[in-house]
Amino acid sequence: MDKLVISGPTRLKGEVTISGAKNAAVAILPATLLIEGVCRIENLPNISDVKMYCKILETLGAKITWLSEHEIEIDSSNISCTQASIDLTSKFRASYYLLGSLLGRCGQAEVGLPGGCNLGARPIDQHIKAFEALGAKVEVAQGKITAKVKRLIGTSIYMDIVSVGATINAILAAVLADGTTTIDNAAKEPHIVDVANFLNTMGADIRGAGTDVIKINGVKKLHGNTSYSVVPDQIEAGTFMLAAVASKGDITIKNCIPEHLDCITAKIVEIGGTVEDYGDSIRVYMNKRPTKATVKTLPYPGYPTDLQPQMGVVLSMANGTSMIHESIWESRFQYTAELNKMGAKITAQGKSAVFEGVSELTGAPIYATDLRAGAALIIAGIVAHGDTQLYNIDHIDRGYENIEEKFRKLGANIQRVVE
Ligand code: UD1
């Protein structure tokens, strides 16, 4: 089992380049199944979730050629199978996008009930509601979901809750349906816009992505023969922004879209940091102890749940007592027990946590409890006095490319140890 050994404290300084977005990549990859032809995807992050998705697509009949570390060509001309490996698909959450894309392409799909980070109950009722509204019959039994339809027919879908996954799955299923589909109360995250842009580049007719009403005019075929570059990762950029603040450092974050980061920038400025916008890069610096704050996670453009643990590290060392309300995932405070081992004073109960700011953290053996918690605990190790051993880092490798290398270039003393 690999671990990260981090010696701190370090003030992070320098430049970091952001990779393609994990959450967009794991939706664009299954979306390629809708294309009867070849397409090229650039700026793919080199992370284990992407490699796992490529493996699954190959088992379904897609031909994948790696052109470079971040670029692939996918030929989905011959999709021979609609039953995805239960073993592989039940390992991660985004495998449920195979339902929308296989249903759209072949009229049937079988996928293992999705796994992924343990963030509390992760229902899929809105996905099922969307497929059924389009005419599919959906069954959940024996650890898998099966969906079948003769012909998908465009319709109106009202999402009872703002869900990124269900919005993307409804788009995937509707792209090749007969007629027009309208999704009301759709999620607006940047990766939803990116999936829609990808599909439109391949010949789809999706309008309104990024607003809460998305309209999809069904088309007969997606043509492929085009390349598409994945959007920069909002969450990776936000992670380095908060690392700059926590470490009282100065980081220039290149290859990002500052507009996607507005909600994080606003909070950083509120707690005393400075953010400078240079169009396709930003500089974040901090030279004092952050002030206390109240943060509530919300769907985009609100403060993202995926940057809640990283903000938790910052607030654990703020001047005064802060509050975080987690409105998306009920079990997203597991990392606070690890931070408390490092001297933080956090009381988490249900969907809220109180952070009594301490002046410093100290190194300790700690465990990454999920992907974003893992990234937050790396930041904690970098700012803490002494040595930290961070275990369970396979969670982090799922979604961050070369994370220890990127932090090392910013001055962190961080090593991966293979045990
Ligand atoms: C969510 C986050 C996304 C983040 C990801 C991993 C939001 C809106 N979404 O996306 O930013 O990257 O977690 O942390 O912030 N829900 C239902 N029924 C469903 C689907 C979802 O009740 O069928 C609920 C969930 O329990 C959750 C909320 O809706 O409370 C948002 O879920 P959803 O956006 O679908 O989750 P992800 O797509 O995983």
Image (cartoon, grey):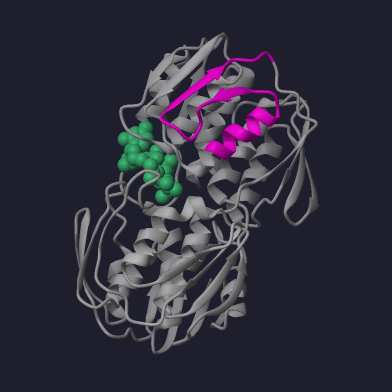
Image coordinates of residue 9 in percent, x first then y, are 44, 87
Res 85 visible = no
Query: Can you name the residue that lies furthest to the bottom here?
Result: 386
Of 58 and 194, nearer the camera is: 194
**Quarter where residue 39 is shown:** top right
Give the residue at x 27% y 82%: 343
Image coordinates of residue 390 in percent, x first then y, are 45, 75
Give the residue at x 57% y 24%: 206
Image coordinates of residue 240 in percent, x first then y, are 50, 67
In magenta segment, residue 203: yes
As drawn, 319 above or below 280: below
Of 264 and 406, nearer the camera is: 264
As drawn, 29 above or below 202: below
As drawn, 405 above or below 71: below
Task: State which image quarter holds ligand 1.
Answer: top left
Q: Seen in the image, is 85 located left or right of residue 185?
A: right
Of 410 and 172, nearer the camera is: 410
Q: Seen in the image, is 161 located left or right of residue 48?
A: left
**Quarter where residue 356 is shown:** bottom left
Give the residue at x 42% y 60%: 265
As drawn, 168 above or below 283: above
Q: Seen in the image, is 351 located left or right of residue 130?
A: left
The total of numbered circles placed on residues is: 0
In magenta segment, residue 38: no
Image: magenta residue range = 193-220
Res 141 visible = yes
